[in-house]
Image: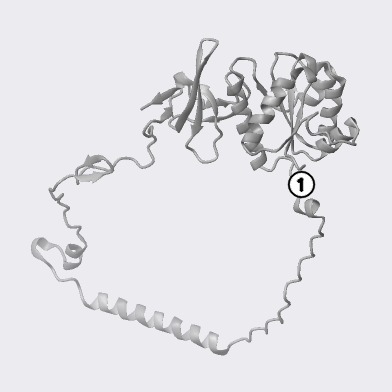
Amino acid sequence: MAHDVFICHSSKDKPVADAICSVLEQGGVRCWIAPRDVLAGLSYGEAIIEAINGAKIMIVVFSASANASPQIEREIERAVNHNIRIVQFRIEDVVPQKALEYFLSSPHWLDAFTPPLERHLRVLANQVRELLDRGAGAPSPEASTGAATPPPRPAATLPPAAPARRGGPALIASAIVLGAVVIAGAVWLTTHKTSPPAPVAGGATAASAAQAPAPVVAAAGPPVVVGSMPVSASSPSPAAGAAGPQAGGCIVADPTPTPLNIRMAPNGQILGAIGNGAAVRVLERQTVDGKAWALVEPQTAGAKSGWVFSSYLRCG
């Protein structure tokens, strides 16, 4: 069976692994998990190797039991060897032993220490879907179909252009245009020298009077409505692009001059940052260790969803 995710877990953590598998498959993400997907007739080791090679993402359910399992170490080594994306789902606050630290020190992880587990499972499912949408571990079209890419067709060869002759119609046309410009300039100079500007009242010439700007009088009238804010016809319009909370949304109001960090989980790994004044939509709120957190979805294109301090948001 084709699958997207290989779930690596200790047999002692099977309830959590089964819960991960259920949430992902309900969201349309295909999973491989032992012993459910081990085919009859295959050795356990052969089935594991085939499943890892066919996966795009490996989820490691990390705990003290997984940390002490040689089988988990071998499965993670195979995934690293095949450039498969590894997502650590830590259900216990355990430091990886040296052999696992070599493989797990670089990838980001998700901490699922605090209950309820369902909330962490939703975050994990969203992260996995985003990785799959980005093509994590996806083979190239040539590798998946086995068809060779046809060589590009050579560009059509055009006959060389004939060398331009010296002189000819182009040169004659240029001479005619240049002559017309010279004649027009001479006529303009002659006219302005022989025809002085006529005086007008007060000693000013007609030319200067024509060039004088007419006074601008602001016409009184009813106020012009811009959006939902009435603005008078003589007052400047409001600045374009000013950020503000949408209905039921919030904006970032970090008191420090630095952008507000967006994290994968409360007190978790930093995914990115978002500047002051940016509009966000709050999906969930939670208090962890006395601090209020909010799961937000930025309204800025390309920004990632994640957790931020609730006290740094101003909501309408």
x then y, percent, for residue 285: 49, 21
Look at the picture and state if 202 lies above or below 308: below
**Which image quarter is the N terminus in?**
top right
Relative to 98, is 189 on the left or the right? left
| Display colour scheme | one colour
Which of these two is toward me, 283 or 194? 283
Residue drawn at (54%, 36%) of the image:
303
Quarter of the rendering containing residue 262 = top right
Q: Residue furthest bottom?
A: 168
Look at the picture and state if 199 lies above or below 233: below
Q: Residue furthest top?
A: 290
Which of these two is toward me, 298 or 156? 298
- Label 1 environment density (alpha carbons within 10 Å; few <14, some 14–19, many ≥20): few
The mark tally for this picture is 1
x then y, percent, for residue 93: 70, 13
Q: Residue furthest left?
A: 201
Which of these two is toward me, 226 or 72? 72
Quarter of the rendering containing residue 313 = top left
x then y, percent, for residue 246: 38, 34
**Which image quarter is the C terminus in?**
top left
Relative to 93, is 40 on the left or the right? right
**Which residue lies under the disc numbered 1?**
139
Q: Secondary structure at mark 1?
A: loop
Query: What kind of residue is marked 1?
Result: Pro
Look at the picture and state if 162 lies above or below 262: below
Relative to 259, is 136 on the left or the right? right
x then y, percent, for residue 305: 55, 32
